[in-house]
Amino acid sequence: MCDHNDRLRYDIGFHCYDCNEFFHKDSPTYRSGELLSSLWMAVHNQCVYLSRDDKKDTDEYRELDAMRDKIGIGKKHDNYEEIITEAESVLSKRNSSAESVNIYLK
């Protein structure tokens, strides 16, 4: 099983040089790994913004912090689609998304 560490990211997915395969953004491999990672970063960024505004003692921060812990770093989730839906909902309250953490070159 490949860990897909050597990646080239595109706006439509990523190419893994370790296994020489392309994973489209709708594939389970992309959604359970790359997308969850982007969602974690977007949630983390929102936590940072609230921290800078001295709002760590708010329900909003606690919700984001709990979501960040739920996604985790490098965690494998059987229920990743549920976590994606929940993270996207939490981020939408702050007008953010997984796309906010990526810059795509064309």
Image: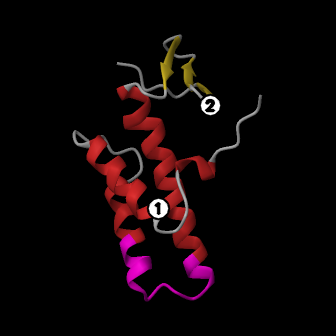
Q: Quadrant of residue 3?
A: top left
Highlighted range, magenta: 50-63
Is residue 11 positioned above or below 45 on the image?
above
The residue at 40%/70% (across/down) is: 65
Name the residue tied to disc 2: 11
Q: Residue at x 54, y 19 (%)?
A: 16
The residue at 40%/35% (across/down) is: 31
Residue for badge 1: 91
Q: Is residue 74 magenta?
A: no
Residue closer to the observer: 75 or 11:
11
- Which amino acid type is marked by label 2? Asp
Dot 1: element: helix
In the image, residue 64 above or below residue 50: above
Quadrant assignment, res 26: top left
Q: CA distance from mark 2 to mark 1?
A: 20 Å
Quadrant of image for the C terminus: top right
Is 61 left or right of 82, judged from the image as shown? right
